[in-house]
Image: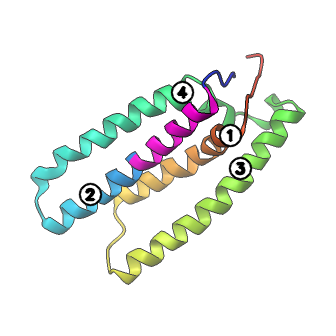
């Protein structure tokens, strides 16, 4: 895997990806509160941007594949990077998720499938966020 895009472009990809996930969840909650299912069409805008951004920033760079590789397929440097990204990501994910559940509880919202699927996606993409944000380059002869 080669991180050929600049660090600033990768950071834009991370921010765009996170904004899209957040938008999808917030739009769904707003639509649910207004009880107007016809507004669900607006969910397609951030969803399309999320898919395109994922393909560009995580699929084509190989970050998704790298963060989901078997430990046996990684060299020492890649193993350290993978371990560091996973450790950091799941610390952040745990704090973020518990905080989000607390907010949902305080404002008395029910947890829905859109939120659950978004959190599942976020759990898998956070290590890639970390690598995109921090690393100058990652190379691997695939």
Graded by Cα atoms within 10 Å as few (under 14), some (14 to 19) or many (20 or more), the crowding at tag 4 reads some
Q: Are marks 1 and 4 in contact (CB under 8 Å)?
A: no
Q: Are marks 2 and 1 in contact (CB under 8 Å)?
A: no
Residue at numbered disc 4: 59
Which tag, 4 or 3, sits closer to the chain's start?
Answer: 4
Q: Write the residue at 64% across / 42% down.
A: 133
Badge 4 marks a residue whose secondary structure is: helix
For the record, the magenta segment spans 6-19
Q: How far apart in space, not on screen, are marks 1 and 4 (Cα)?
A: 14 Å
Badge 2 marks a residue whose secondary structure is: helix
Where does the C terminus fall, quadrant-wise? top right
Q: Is residue 41 left or right of residue 24?
A: left
Q: How far apart in space, not on screen, are marks 3 and 1 (Cα)?
A: 10 Å
> Residue furthest toward the bottom?
106
Q: How far apart in space, not on screen, are marks 2 and 4 (Cα)?
A: 26 Å
> Residue furthest toward the right?
76
Residue at numbered disc 3: 86
Q: How far apart in space, not on screen, are marks 2 and 3 (Cα)?
A: 29 Å
Q: Are marks 2 and 3 in contact (CB under 8 Å)?
A: no
Q: Position of residue 94 (x, y in %)?
A: 61, 65
């Amino acid at each position: 895997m080669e991180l050929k895009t600049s660090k600033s472009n990768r950071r834009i990809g991370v921010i765009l990806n996170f904004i899209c996930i957040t938008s999808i969840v917030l739009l769904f909650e707003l639509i649910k509160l207004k009880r107007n299912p016809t507004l669900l069409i607006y969910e397609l805008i951030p969803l399309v941007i999320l898919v395109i951004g994922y393909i560009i920033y995580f699929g084509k760079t190989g970050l998704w594949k790298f963060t989901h590789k078997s430990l046996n397929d990684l060299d020492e440097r890649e193993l350290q990077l993978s371990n560091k990204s996973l450790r950091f990501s799941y610390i952040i994910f745990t704090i973020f998720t518990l905080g989000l559940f607390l907010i949902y509880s305080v404002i008395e919202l029910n947890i829905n499938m859109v939120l659950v699927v978004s959190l599942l996606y976020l759990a898998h993409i956070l290590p890639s966020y970390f690598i995109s944000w921090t690393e100058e380059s990652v190379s691997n002869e695939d």
